[in-house]
Image: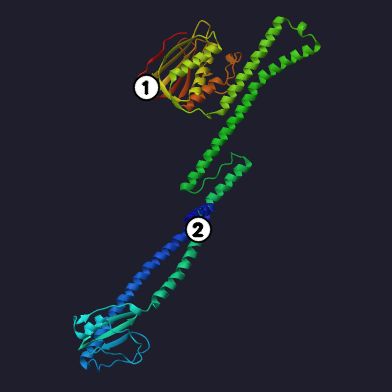
């Protein structure tokens, strides 16, 4: 039984959750009106019952005093008692010997109570008010002459019942009207939601993100429409960015793929003719194979960087407090392993930030690789890390030709390569990845000309622990 009782609320909850918002508002409105009518009926019934009781008792007192006055004049045995008219109050005279007189035709009354007998014998006060509800009678006993008189009012629930029936009809009418009004209010109030739903379905079916939802209404509805329009704008920007990325990637892949295809076709054609050994000298074959290897490596690098860029900020790696100096040292070590003759002068101090270690190391590695391509062999790449106020500042300084003022605003754009850099290896994505990682960590990236005439790339990240900095590694190559 207890299990069944527990299942009922769950079923009711599931049913309620399956209903539409319009149905819920209708049910809530009808229920609220029903509860209000019930409470009003209970209060009104209590007030009406109290008022009727007070009026009846007051009338009993008046009738009893009138009968007692007549009994004082004519005597209890001779006082005239009018025949019972068939309805209304009942009267009774209690004689000194305990017997009673009642009007002709009057229904039989309950026996005289002990309290009423004491009044008739004069044992109690001259006036004793007693209200009895037994058998539906309301009795008032009053001392008169040598006995007493009684006026009895038969309790009548008719007015209360009639009032209750009327209130029931009114309540049902109010509940029905409340349901209709609630339905109308719900339909009117939810009309913007319906139009918003239709617009969202239309966007989902047509995939047309440019079709914004018209702004209407106010308050919560307007804020919801604005939020959805903002979401559509964000999706529109994301789709445009994806399209541009695909177009740029296709453009950048075209050149190495074309070169790779031409070189392979040349080798295949010569091999089919059987002139591979005679048509190409050993030096030419070596140069061609080196070109093929470089083109494959370039394609691999471009594919890896495109994958990293397309993923955006999606990563399973969580942010954690870390010493940025450790990340910089690890990135420099990785750059040296990739380019053994790369010289890097480190001047880093311990600065704590909150971030993703692998992403930050990739950003620093891209900076060092970019600087290494431009620095002369006798000039090391300078990497400096220090704390400035609430920021960790990383500077990568090369002694190359530097960045022209016209190219500086677009250095961090995807696939952008200055005219002077088109002959250099690279995809044009490295610095774009750097900027994305830095922005994801709440920092900023900038480019300037270094004191040595080359490029100075500067990163700023918010620190998490402003403890005193400790030198992590002395300058060196």
Callout 2: helix, strand or loop?
helix
Q: Position of residue 379 (x, y in %)?
A: 50, 7
User: Quick one: 327 or 236, which is closer to the camera?
Assistant: 327
User: Quick one: 14 or 251, which is closer to the camera?
Assistant: 14
Q: Position of residue 236 (x, y in %)?
A: 57, 35
Q: Residues within 10 Å of mark 2 (few under 14, many from 20)?
A: many
User: Which residue bears the numbered disc 2?
Assistant: 26
The image shows residue 186, relative to residue 45, as above or below, that is: above
Write the residue at 59% across / 41% down.
Answer: 211
As drawn, the label of residue 389 is: 1
Q: Position of residue 23 (x, y in %)?
A: 52, 56
Q: Residues within 10 Å of mark 1 (few under 14, many from 20)?
A: few
User: Quick one: 272 or 137, which is closer to the camera?
Assistant: 137
Write the residue at 80% across / 10% down.
Answer: 274
Q: Position of residue 213 (x, y in %)?
A: 55, 44
Disc 2 to disc 1: CB gap under 8 Å: no
* Residue sitting at the far bottom: 78
């Amino acid at each position: 039984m207890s299990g069944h009782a527990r299942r009922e609320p769950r079923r009711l909850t599931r049913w309620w959750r399956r209903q539409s918002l319009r149905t819920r508002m209708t049910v809530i409105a009808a229920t609220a009106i029903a509860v209000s009518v019930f409470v009003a009926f209970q209060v009104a019934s209590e007030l009406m019952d109290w008022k009727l009781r007070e009026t009846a008792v007051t009338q009993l007192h008046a009738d009893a005093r009138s009968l007692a006055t007549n009994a004082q004049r004519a005597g209890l045995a001779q006082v005239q008692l009018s025949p019972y008219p068939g309805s209304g109050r009942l009267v009774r005279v209690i004689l000194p010997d305990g017997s009673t007189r009642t009007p002709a035709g009057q229904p039989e009354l309950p026996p005289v109570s002990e309290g009423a007998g004491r009044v008739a014998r004069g044992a109690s006060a001259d006036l004793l008010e007693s209200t009895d509800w037994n058998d539906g009678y309301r009795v008032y006993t009053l001392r008169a002459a040598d006995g007493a008189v009684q006026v009895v009012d038969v309790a009548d629930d008719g007015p209360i019942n009639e009032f209750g029936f009327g209130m029931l009809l009114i309540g049902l009418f109010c509940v029905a009207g409340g349901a209709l009004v609630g339905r109308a209010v719900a339909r009117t109030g939810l009309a913007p939601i319906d139009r918003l739903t239709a617009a969202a379905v239309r966007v989902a079916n047509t995939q047309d993100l440019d079709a914004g939802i018209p702004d209407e209404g106010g308050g919560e509805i307007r804020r919801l429409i604005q939020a959805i329009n903002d979401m559509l704008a964000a999706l529109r920007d994301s789709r445009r960015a994806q399209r541009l990325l695909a177009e740029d990637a296709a453009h950048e892949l075209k050149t190495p793929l074309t070169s790779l295809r031409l070189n392979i076709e040349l080798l295949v054609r010569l091999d089919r003719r059987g002139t591979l050994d005679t048509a190409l000298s050993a030096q030419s074959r070596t140069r061609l194979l080196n070109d093929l290897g470089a083109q494959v490596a370039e394609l691999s690098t471009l594919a890896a960087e495109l994958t990293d860029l397309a993923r955006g900020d999606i990563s399973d790696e969580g942010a954690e407090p870390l010493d940025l100096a450790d990340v910089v040292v690890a990135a420099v070590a990785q750059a040296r392993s990739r380019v053994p003759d790369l010289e890097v002068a480190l001047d880093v101090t311990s600065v704590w930030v909150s971030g993703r270690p692998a992403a930050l190391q990739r950003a620093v590695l891209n900076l060092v690789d970019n600087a290494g391509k431009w620095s002369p062999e006798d000039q090391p790449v300078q990497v400096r890390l220090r704390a400035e106020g609430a920021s960790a500042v990383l500077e990568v300084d090369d002694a190359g030709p530097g960045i022209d003022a016209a190219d500086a605003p677009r250095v961090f754009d995807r696939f952008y390569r200055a005219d002077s850099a088109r002959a250099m290896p690279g995809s044009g994505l490295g610095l774009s990845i750097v900027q994305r990682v830095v922005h994801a960590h709440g920092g900023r990236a900038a480019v300037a000309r270094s004191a040595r005439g080359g490029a100075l790339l500067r990163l700023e990240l918010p620190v998490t622990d402003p403890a005193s900095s400790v030198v992590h590694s002395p300058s060196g190559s």
